[in-house]
Amino acid sequence: MAPLSAIPLNHYLALSAILFSIGVIGVLTRRNAIIVFMCVELMLNSVNLTLVAFSAFLGQITGQILVFFVMAVAAAEAAVGLAIIIAIFRNKQTVNIDEINLMKW
Amino acid sequence: MYQLAGYIVLLPLLGFLANGLFGKRISSERLSGLIGSGTVGASFVMAAIIFLEMLKASPEQRFHVVTLFQWVAAGSLKVDVAFQIDQLSILMTLIVTGVGFLIHVYSIGYMHGDRAFWRFFAYLNLFIFMMLNLVLADNFLLMFLGWEGVGLCSFLLIGFWHDRKFDTGGYAPGTATTSDAARKAFIVNRIGDFGFLIALFLMFNMFGSLVFEDVFARANAIIAPGDATMFWITLLLFMGAAGKSAQIPLYVWLPDAMAGPTPVSALIHAATMVTAGVYMVARCALLYSLAPATMEIVAIVGTATAFFAATMGLVQNDIKKVLAYSTVSQLGYMFLGLGVGSFTAGIFHVMTHAFFKALLFLGAGAVIHAMRDEQDIQKMGGLRSNLPLTYKTFVVAALAIAGIPPLSGFFSKDEILWRAYEHGSFLYWLAGWLTAGLTAFYMFRLVSLTFEGKGRWGHDVHPHEAPRTMTVPLVILAILSVIGGMAGIPQSLGGGNAVEQWLEPVFAKARSHLMSGYAGAGSEYLFMGLSVAVAVAGISAARIFYMKRPDLPARMAAAFSRLHTLLWRKYYVDEVYDALVVTPLVRGSDKLLWKGVDAGFIDGIVNAAAKVVSMASERLRRIQGGVVQGYAFAFVVGIIVILGILMFR
């Protein structure tokens, strides 16, 4: 296996940034609520990648510990979010977030 | 004993509160009348006690100030509720409470059966309270409180029978109510009060105090006669007096004030409130003596008012209107006396006038009561036999006001005329003398048309003498009208002129600034003779016109019809005021101030502010679209902005 120093840190960070941006664009533009959640997970995982990359390059274990926390929170959040989507679906028979717009002026 | 002054003023206030708050529930004429009259009677007794105390003391010891409590302490303005008891104020207090008491007793009979009997006595007591504050005050501010207060009570009492129709003699025919008369009285009074207030400001600015003794002492020390500011202060004070005491040009409210019940006319518009102006000028004698120009103005206005009012009284047909113009005329006499420097003569006439004018009004009230509220003398006549006591007392009062010796009116009126001549102006004396003749004439015209001859009333009227509560005050006032003059018999006739001696210390400093002439006792007898002669001439002329040859008045009216109409329509003064002052003000208020400024401009600003907020919020609410991705987009934009700032700082 090639040593970690063979791939420069910047490559990891760039990949993470690209993944984050893709996630953001997905959250902003997709209509299906479940797809939006997938994009949110994508954003969270890009952050995980950043943390792990730094952890490896700085030789400290702190980054990987933080990744555990992020994963736990992501899981919990996904569970709750999907529960909310199911509740909405039961009422409105749709998961198209453009149609969930009652909370306005 | 002087501490009683506080109670003298307090009792009528308590009477007002008792009748005002509980009168309707008590609902007993006897009790309301008792409370109302009792408080004033008690005040009179206390005033008499103080007076007797003062008689025993020497002239220097007769001055007392009784302080009740501090009223205003704002910066350099310190005013207490304090009463000044001296010769002048105790005399006025006796007049107010004495004549007031008699009129309260009279009202028990006159207002019998009225459904607001208790309210009448409440207002009467409030009036006495305010009037006592006015005459007993030791500072201008408390006097002004009483001044305004009596104006208020005048308004309340004139309009006592509100919504009753009222005849104003040709002006605004058929539509005027007693409330209109009450409003007119209050508003015209307020115009005078404006002058009074400005004078107070000037006085405080100049002397730093509003207490009489302070102001007079400082004025005496630092002001030279003829000073310009003093001219304005005294002139503005006189403007207030002209409003309150019905002098030209602010007399127009008094004839219309006859819309109120007759005891009100007797008390307020004959004996007390209208004399407040005279009292005020007398109290400020020192200030006036330092402004000779104003004193001339006072004398001129007084003389002119006396003459013109007498001419208007010649042709009136309402019994109370004749007496109203007579009051205005006699008030003119009082100001003439003050204006020529004889302050005691003016106050003496206040006293005698209170007696006989109150008697005249109360007698007129007895007649109106007997004739079932008829007030037109053309529909009366022959009441001499039906109302003997009223007739006799009325004639006594008429003789007194005409100036027939030895009744009181002769002494006080003659004193004024004599002093006017002494002062140097023959014109004042001549005008006053002619007015005396006119006074005798219209007074006995009234007596003849009301009491003499044959009755001109219909069959449904059964005139009968009034009850005792009404006739006893008439008799007492008649006695006072006869003997009241004894207090002021001049030295030329052997008397000591007690009134002048009594009041002299009050006016001593003022008189020292005035030049006084003296024309010798011989001429004084001549003028006395002339006064009596003109009075007798007036009475005889009236008897000829109205008893011996009753066709004569109608023929004279036809021959001088334009002059007659001019007098009958009161020189059209009311119409002129209406055109020049009232209508422009009302129209200006309606079109410009109400519709233009208030509804248009101010409401417009408020409405515009509301519209702006409304439009802004209309635009702003579109931010909250309800779509989650919109909010998320806002997040992202914000993050980019912050990142940019952080990176490129």
Image (cartoon, rainbow, N blue to C red):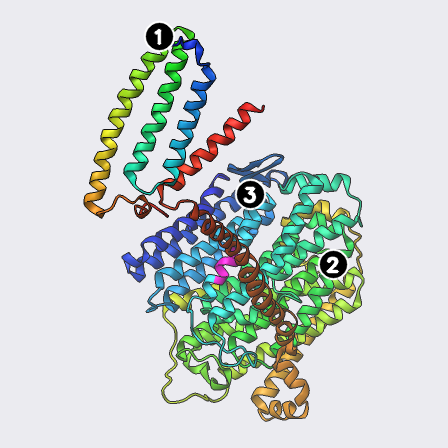
Q: Residue at x 30, y 33 (%)?
A: A37
Residue on which the image places disc 3: B54
Tell me, yes or no, whether the two marked residues, 1 and 3, touch with CB atoms within 8 Å.
no
Local crowd size for mark 3, using a 10 Å CA cut-off: few (<14), some (14–19), many (≥20): many
Q: Are marks 1 and 3 on the same chain?
A: no
Front of the two marks 3 and 2: 2
- Tell whether position B153 is magenta: yes
Q: Which mark is residue B31?
A: none
Residue contact between numbered discs 3 and 2, judged by CB atoms under 8 Å: no
How many numbered circles does the render carry? 3
- Packing grade of label 2 (10 A; few <14, some 14-19, many >=20) is many
Discs 3 and 2 carry the same chain letter: yes
Mark 1 crowd level (few <14, some 14–19, many ≥20, 10 Å Cα) = few
On the image, the x and y values in percent for residue B93 come to: 53, 51
Q: Which residues are magenta?
A: B150-155
The amino acid at mark 1 is: Ile
Q: Amino acid at mark 3?
A: Met
Dominant secondary structure (helix, strand or loop) of the stretch shown in magenta: helix
Q: Amino acid at mark 2?
A: Val
Q: Is residue B496 visible?
A: no
Which residue is disc 2 drawn over? B340
Image location (x, y in percent) of residue B428: 75, 67
- In the rendered structure, find residue A61 and report the number of the disc placed on it: 1
* Rendered view: A97 above or below B421: above
Q: Chain of mark 3?
A: B
Q: Percent from the top left, x then y, of residue B267? A: 49, 62
